[in-house]
Structures are given as structure tokens and as C-alpha cells.
């Protein structure tokens, strides 16, 4: 993807399922002059996702997609992405696993942020698992999405020290603060190498 400037920023969609704190940091980042992305569409599978408040606040188009039928849901999403000429997808706490077919449609254009130092602790409950294993560090990873869960090419990682009194909740909070910084850095690394 060529570097785009000014009003030619890369049209981006962010997928969320919950609070949308990474969405908020990506929106703030997208408003900076140095940012290569423009967030044009927010997609969620959760009618009650708190992150939808940011769509309203920042006047960004949103779509709520019912995932009862995954195949149909993905077709609707692909339709929306193509209609809005989206060139980059950022998964930010999106709790659905996308199909191989969906990923093939947007190969190399889907990014995800994961709350562990991949390849360790793919999937869910990463903080609990890292603490149980008595790890000294955990952290977060921004990676390209491939058809294998949390296995795509790593773009950037940030280490966070695990203290002896850390609970999964405390650790999650520390890592989330780093996620908000790492995602924009990873986007800059890809689009402004």
C-alpha cells in the first residue's frame, strides 16, 4: 500500500465487541497530522458495546452485525467494507474469529492487537494464564491477521513486567495502557516505513 497524504488517508474500519478503549485511542491517533489512517466505519457484533458511544461522539458511521449466522454476518461486513472503500481493518477487542474466506478477501489488510507476547498465550484469559505460569513478563502484540488464531506476522510488541502482587485485573489494566500506545506505533510502522 502506497503512502497517502492529506485527505488521501487510508480508509479504515475498526471492529469492536466491548468498551472500545483501543478504538478511542485509534480515533485520537487518526486525527493527528502524521497519522496515515482515517476511521470511516465502526463494526460491532454487540448491540450494547460501550465503544459505540465513540461512534456517536466522533460522528463515525457504525454498523451492528448480528452473528447468529456467521456466514451471513461476514457477507454483510464484506459488503459494508467494499461499499465504504475500506483499505485497512483494525480489530480492537473484537470477540469473533473471522473465517479464512473473510481473511482472504482482505489479506494483509487486517490488523489485530492481542494482550500477550505472542506466540505465547493465544486466545482468551491471557493474563490469568501468564500469572499461573509465573511469567516475569507479559505484554501486547500487534499482528497481521491470518487464518490461524493469533498467529499472523508480528508487527510490534511491548513488554510489561508482571509483579508478584499483580492480579489478572491489575495486569490487564497495565497492558491496556500499553496497547493504546502500541497500536498507533504499529500502524505508523506499516504505512510509513
Image (cartoon, rainbow, N blue to C red):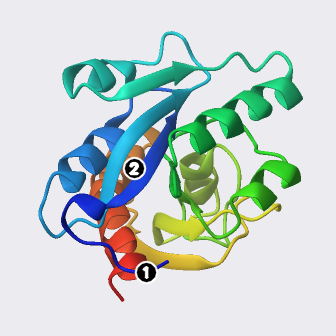
Find residue 117 and report its horizontal and vertical position in percent. 55, 70
Residue 114 appears in view: no
Residue 71: image quadrant is: top right
Q: How many marks?
A: 2
Residue 2: image quadrant is: bottom left
Identify the residue at image location x=41%, y=53%: 11
Along the viewing direction, whichever of 167 and 92 lies nearer the viewer: 92
Q: Which residue corresponds to mark 1? A: 2
Identify the residue at image location x=21%, y=29%: 58
Residue 186 appears in view: yes
Identify the residue at image location x=32%, y=75%: 188
Find residue 115 and report its horizontal and vertical position in percent. 51, 55
The label nearer to you, 1 versus 2, is 1
Along the viewing direction, whichever of 143 and 64 lies nearer the viewer: 64
Residue 149 horizontal side relative to residue 109, left or right? right
Label 1: how many Cα within 10 Å (few below 14, some 14–19, many 20+): few
The residues tagged by marks 1 and 2 sit, at their Cα atoms, a distance apart of: 37 Å
Residue 35 horizontal side relative to residue 158, left or right? left
**Helix, strand or loop at mark 1:** loop
Residue 116 horizontal side relative to residue 161, left or right? right
Find residue 151 and report its horizontal and vertical position in percent. 73, 68
Q: Which residue corresponds to mark 2? A: 171
Q: Residue furthest bottom?
A: 193
Amino acid at each position: 500500500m502506497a503512502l497517502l497524504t492529506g485527505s488521501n488517508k487510508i480508509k479504515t474500519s475498526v471492529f469492536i465487541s466491548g468498551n472500545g478503549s483501543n478504538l478511542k485511542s485509534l480515533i485520537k491517533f487518526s486525527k493527528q497530522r502524521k497519522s496515515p489512517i482515517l476511521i470511516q466505519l465502526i463494526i460491532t457484533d454487540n448491540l450494547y458495546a460501550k465503544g459505540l458511544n465513540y461512534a456517536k461522539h466522533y460522528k463515525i458511521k457504525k454498523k451492528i452485525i448480528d452473528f447468529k449466522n456467521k456466514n451471513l454476518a461476514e457477507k454483510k461486513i464484506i459488503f459494508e467494507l467494499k461499499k465504504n472503500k475500506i483499505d485497512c481493518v483494525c480489530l480492537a477487542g473484537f470477540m469473533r474469529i473471522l473465517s479464512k474466506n473473510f481473511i482472504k478477501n482482505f489479506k494483509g489488510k487486517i490488523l489485530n492487537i492481542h494482550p500477550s507476547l505472542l506466540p505465547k498465550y493465544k486466545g482468551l484469559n491471557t493474563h490469568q494464564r501468564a500469572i499461573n505460569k509465573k511469567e516475569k513478563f507479559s505484554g501486547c502484540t500487534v499482528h497481521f491477521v491470518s487464518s490461524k488464531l493469533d498467529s499472523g506476522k508480528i508487527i510490534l510488541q511491548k513488554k510489561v513486567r508482571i509483579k508478584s502482587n499483580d492480579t489478572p485485573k491489575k495486569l490487564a489494566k497495565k497492558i491496556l495502557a500499553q496497547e493504546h500506545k502500541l497500536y498507533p506505533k504499529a500502524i505508523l510502522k506499516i504505512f510509513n516505513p
